[in-house]
Image (tube, grey):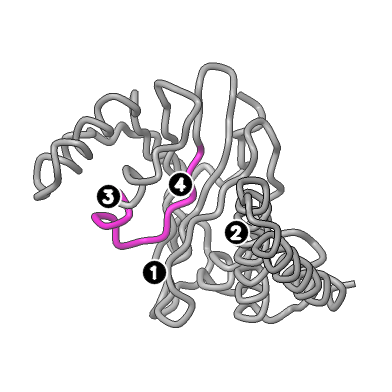
Amino acid sequence: MDELELNLPINALVNKPVHKKKFYEKAAISKKLKDEFVEKVQKITWRYKLAEDTIGIEKTDSVIEIQVFQVELKEQVIPKNVLKLIDKFIPYPILYQFIYKDNFAYGINLKNSSLGHDYYFSDWNSPVSFDFNAINLEKLYQKLIQAFISDEIKQQGDFEVVITTDKQIKQLEHEIQALDSRIKREKQFNRKVELNKTLLKTKDQLQTIKGSQL
């Protein structure tokens, strides 16, 4: 599938299967999570190893290597709980390529002591433009994450500001969606009025943040 070709050096190519049992047999996990792993993941392939000796980019104390895993799925749903298990076992950042039949998507996990942990995903069948040029692997990791973030937010420049702003926008959008649902369900007029006030205030906050990106 051409959309999954990353144009990385041949030295970075690994192309080895990663056995699913490696993750769930050695861990004290629930039967539900094990079943999810078995029922939703067809196979995992270790596609690339991005390291100082494979792509010639200097490692840092925080990012020694970056892996690229290709995950073939049994349904067109990304199993986030399974990814958390994989990321728990693999000490390095992972760029995921998801495949379901002729469909594809990408994902990556932010692992940062100060910014927290969060997943970023592309829409299905939406190509993502990755830039694999950087002064070190930490900066490369940051660039891979920012490939999932809109250009308007990325104009902030500083990585921590970009991530914080993106989190704020996502949180406000989630609150707006939840308020919309509550307003539609609410029967009491006075309560509906109050909820609408909160909704307008939240939308104003979102517009203020988005407006500062222009």
Does 163 sit above or below residue 130? Answer: below
Work out whether residue 4 or residue 79 is closer to the camera in this orientation and state it.
Answer: 79
Q: Quadrant of residue 208?
A: bottom right
Q: Which residue bears the numbered disc 3?
A: 85
Identity of the residue furthest to the top in this view: 101
Mark identifier at residue 68: 4
Work out whether residue 93 or residue 131 is closer to the camera in this orientation and state it.
Answer: 93
CB contact under 8 Å: marks 4 and 2: no
Residue at the image point whose x is 40% and y is 45% from the top: 80
Does 147 sit above or below residue 142? Answer: above
Identify the magenta region: 86-97
Residue at the image point whose x is 58% and y is 18% from the top: 102
The answer to whether residue 147 is visible is: no
Question: Which is more foreground, mark 2 or mark 3?
Answer: 3
* Amino acid under disc 3: Leu
Q: Which residue bears the numbered disc 2?
A: 144
Report how far apart the C-alphas of labels 2 and 3 lie in the structure.
21 Å
Q: Secondary structure at mark 1?
A: loop
CB contact under 8 Å: marks 4 and 3: no
Mark identifier at residue 64: 1
Q: Quadrant of residue 145?
A: bottom right
